[in-house]
Image (cartoon, rainbow, N blue to C red):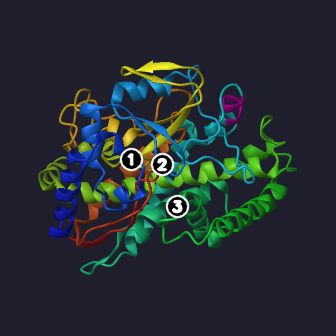
Amino acid sequence: MSDGANDIAAQAKARAWSMPIEDINVADPDLFRTNSFWPYFERLRKEDPVHYCKDHEFGPYWSITKYNDIMFVDTNHQLFSSEPSITIADPKDDFQLPMFIAMDQPKHDLQRKVVSPIVSPANLGRLESTIRERVNTIFDGLPEGETFDWVDKVSIELTTQMLATLFDFPWEDRRKLTYWSDITTAGPNSPLFVSEEHRRAQLMDCAQYFMGLWNERVNLTEPGNDLISMLAHGESTRNMDRMEFLGNLLLLIVGGNDTTRNSLTGGVLALNQNPAEYEKLRADPSLIPNMVSEIIRWQTPLAHMRRNALQDVELGGKTIKKGDKVIMWYVSGNRDDEVIENADSFIIDRARARQHLSFGFGIHRCVGNRLAEMQLKIVWEEILKRWSFVEVMGDPDYVPSSFVKGYFNLPVRLHK
């Protein structure tokens, strides 16, 4: 961490512990842009783990910041609804994008079941050699001995190639998937955001492009083993209207992109910040599968998920009223040292490393979690075969979002 980043961290800690606790708004995207949110969550976990923020641009909300309380909300679907949105922002009345992650049972279960075969153990087995081949092709093209952007050259390129495979998407246009993912989650503070009208136009272009693919595949006697064919032929998805089709597309694009992409970058950063762990990894590459889980906990690529209370609920000595917005801060629960020992430490041989919240729990647990883990595992296996050190050369540029906890870039240099 540079001197500038250290100064920001020190200032954030002073502010977080001195301001009136009722004024804390952990959903402020600027806290994530500056990576200065940690002391705010630390204070909430200690002093007010079920915290009410009454003043926010998207309306008042509850912050759930401790591991066990998050698990309670995430697994009690009778008390907390995923409708109408999984993010702190409410959907616009004139631009509704239904998607199965923001649906309750039974419709959620029926639509999720349509796409889940794409990540079945048998299909993952078939994908493994493809992923390894692509990782090596990407690595063959990387410069050695000079600084380049790991996010663009590796994290984005690998995940975009994977998405193109899952959708059977035209290869030459695959970077459109990256753009649509980024524009979907970009807030007004993002350099990618032009206006809400511009965003909608871009997303409707996405819908138009995918409708062309849908029309090619919907009448095939033998449907392909890709997500568009699955949606086009699935009993609960084949009659979706355009906006529900677009909503589910964006869910699959963002879900397939951000978890892996930002964990690929976060892992490189974490090992540089913890050189003893990097040495441990070099000495024992068999630690890679366990390290992958630790990277995903440490990174927590989606900082929060939202629920709405279906009735009055008592939690942490507070009364959450029916209709209240409830935010589960996975990024905070993953640092709860009452459940995870030495939670603020990055430990690649941590016991029970998969005991993290990054994939969620209950019916909405990330459908592609095993695919994300497999991609990270293969990347690190191939890194260790080629290079002794992926060296971070400067501070990362963080995404200004309280939902996607990610990176715009990370300068690195490769060493034999």
Q: Nearer the viewer, residue 252 or 305?
A: 305
Q: Are marks 1 and 2 in contact (CB under 8 Å)?
A: yes
Q: CA distance from mark 1 to mark 2?
A: 7 Å
SS type, badge 1 = loop
Q: Please state the horizontal and vertical placement of residue 393, each as a whole percent of the image.
A: 23, 72
Residue ID for mark 3: 187
Nearest to N terminus: mark 1 or mark 2 = 1
Q: Secondary structure at mark 2?
A: loop
Residue type pointed to by label 1: Asn
Where's the C terminus, which quadrant? bottom left
- Considering the numbered disc 3 on the image, is that residue within a helix, a strand or a loop? loop
Do the CB atoms of the residues marked 3 and 2 lie less than 8 Å apart? no
Q: Residues within 10 Å of mark 2 (few under 14, many from 20)?
A: few
Say which residue appears at 36% left-offset and 69% top-offset.
150
| Label disc, if present, on residue 56 of the rendered structure | 2
Foreground label between 1 and 3? 1
The vertical placement of 359 against 378, above or below, is: above
Q: Which residue is mark 1?
A: 25
Image coords of residue 143 (percent x, y): 33, 79
Place of residue 60 in the rendered image (x, y in percent of width and height, measured from the top left): 50, 41
Q: Amino acid at mark 2?
A: His
The number of numbered badges drawn on the structure is 3
Q: Quadrant of residue 116?
A: top right
Q: Quadrant of residue 339?
A: top left
Above or below 212: residue 227: above
Residue beneath the point at 47% across and 26% down: 73
Of the residues shown, which amino acid type is indicated by label 3? Gly
Q: CA distance from mark 3 to mark 2?
A: 14 Å
Magenta residues, as a range? 107-111
- Mark 1: give few (<14), some (14-19) or many (20+) Cα within 10 Å: many
Left or right of 105, for residue 304 = left
Gap between marks 1 and 3, in whole Å? 16 Å
